[in-house]
Image (spheres, grey):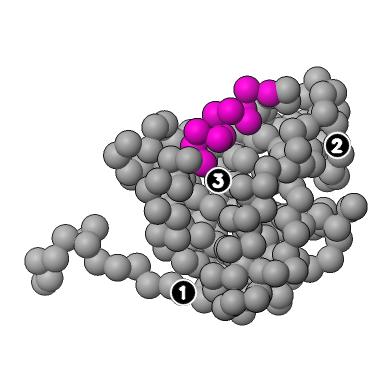
Amino acid sequence: MSDVPEALLPRPRREVALGAVHLPDWLDAARQRELVVLCRTWARGPVPMRAVRMPSGGTMSVRSLGLGWHWQPYRYSRTADDAGGQAVLPFPEVLRDRGRAAVTAPHGPGAGSGYEPDAALVNYYDDDARMGMHQDRGERGEAPVVSLSRGAGCVFRFGNARTRNRPWQDVELYSGDLFVFGGPSRLAYHGVVRTLPGTAPNGIGFEGRINITLRQTGLG
């Protein structure tokens, strides 16, 4: 058995499926803290972070906030029609830059030059929050989805584009990790099985998990 602490063992980049890549530790500690501060600012409004109510009547355990566009099942709008009706904050330039860099990271220089993310969904998970298997289908076009993790880790389930059922893979995402999926995996079902309490890095500034997904809606 190795005597090397697990925290010192590198987690390699991995192509989970064709077009879906996991890059551990992509955001350094300073950039993670920067995004946490920005998330606190965005959460002050004018649109509040809220638990999304589904058409079935159920309420998601994750609390969400939209930037650039407001998402509610299953459409985008410029106003938070299910959360007070206020106009959403503009899409932040810092996230546009991060999005282009994120698309470039797994595919090489130039891959992110045509990527124009214009919607961000900021999701906050407490220790009991989950996300059921779903597809990101509200966008026009096939531009990739970028996922940035901060805080506690989670078990992220990444499946296939045909069904919510198997085959799927469970991937542990930790603070600073990047996950990008596009191409043949753009419409793959995915979700969060559970969070991993107690795994947030020291000094991150909050309890729980924050995930930001960036998307190019194609809505103009």
Query: Total marks drawn?
Result: 3
Q: What residue type is labelled 3?
A: Asn
- The residue nearer to you, when weighing 167 against 145, is 145
| Residue 141 badge | none
Which contiguous range is marked in magenta?
35-45
- The residue nearer to you, when weighing 128 against 153, is 153
Compare marks 1 and 3 and give the one earlier in the sequence.
Answer: 1
**Is 64 in the magenta?**
no
Residue identifier under label 1: 14
* Residue at x 85% of width, y 36% of height: 78
- Between circles 2 and 1, the one closer to the viewer is 2
Q: Which amino acid does label 1 sit on?
A: Arg
Residue 117 picture quarter:
bottom right
Residue 16 placement (x, y as % from top left): 52, 73
* Residue at x 80% of width, y 20% of height: 84
Residue 161 placement (x, y as % from top left): 71, 69
Q: In this view, does 6 lie above or below 73?
A: below
- The residue nearer to you, when weighing 124 against 94, is 94
Q: What is the CA distance from the residue labelled 1 to the residue labelled 3?
A: 19 Å
Residue 1 placement (x, y as % from top left): 11, 71
Residues at badges 3 and 2 in contact (C-beta under 8 Å)?
A: no
Residue identifier under label 2: 78
Residue 213 placement (x, y as % from top left): 63, 51
| Residue 211 badge | 3
